[in-house]
Image: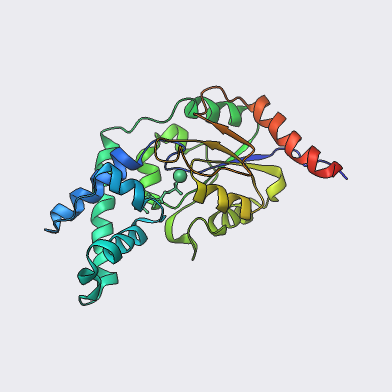
Amino acid sequence: MLRPMLAALIFDVDGTLADTERDGHRPAFNAAFAEYGLAWRWDAELYGELLAVTGGKERVRFFCERHDPGFLRGPDADARIRELHAAKTRHYVKLCAQGIPLRPGVAALLREARSAGLRLAIATTTTPENVTALLPPDLMGLFETVGAGDSVPNKKPAPDIYRWVLAEMHLPPAACLAIEDSANGLKAARAAGLATVITRTAYTEDHDFAGALAQLPDLGRVTVPLLRHWHENAYGRDKKS
Ligand code: XBP
Ligand code: MG
């Protein structure tokens, strides 16, 4: 049977393209809480625990269940969480305007991949506005498909966002590689049938990355030929067994 050729790279955003959680999303949440007169403050350690849940709205609800259940008993808690999250997104977009650096090797690999004829896509849990706010327009323009936020019913570790992106690109998972930073992300990509490269962050250093194609500190030493080699190994090996 023919080995699938590598045709596309599908990138996660938070923790993969940039280390956005501790110094981007977390202060944006805290700014929104202050704006709404809430006494909640997420320090870096607590936020690390809350990252077990993907999705900002879902994370606020998860926090309330443990630290302020009264907030959820109030009238229309869902609407207030949505409003709070919209404020958080405004603060996050402002923070991005001040510049959140991309992780080592990301910009170079995106450009190299496009000039090598690979197609690029994004599969993220974060809100779409956050993606365009984070990426400079020239890099944003390299992606043909962006799957983000509430465009699918279930967030990572469910495979929905990866399946949505594969459908948009009309590609089988075997023709792609996913690049992720967290165990939830790895589970989502693997459940969608994608071989996955992991770049760990300070928040995901101790995550279980069993089943990953490779685990790296960052993309600083990753090139397209190396990704092609890993992809071939992954699928070559599968075909023989
Ligand atoms: C990580 C997430 C997101 C962000 C916050 O996304 O879980 O929810 O933490 O963004 P990724 P929102 O899949 O890119 O790693 O508040 O917009 O949800
Ligand atoms: Mg991530």
Task: From the top left corner, tell me how far across and down residue 171 is, in percent.
Answer: 68, 50
Q: Is residue 3 above or below residue 65?
A: above
Q: Residue furthest right?
A: 1
Tell me if residue 146 can be seen.
Answer: no
Q: Quadrant location of residue 134?
A: top left
| Left or right position of 65 against 5 | left
Q: Is residue 63 above or below residue 185?
A: below
Task: From the top left corner, tell me how far across and down residue 39 is, in percent.
Answer: 13, 56
At x 38%, y 50%, the residue is: 51
Tell me if residue 52 can be seen.
Answer: yes
Task: From the top left corner, tell me how far across and down residue 113 is, in percent.
Answer: 60, 30
Q: Residue furthest top?
A: 221
At x 53%, y 44%, the residue is: 208
| Left or right position of 210 against 31 | right
Task: From the top left corner, tell me how far across and down residue 22 is, in percent.
Answer: 31, 40
| Left or right position of 16 against 23 | right
Quarter containing the N terminus: top right
At x 36%, y 46%, the residue is: 130
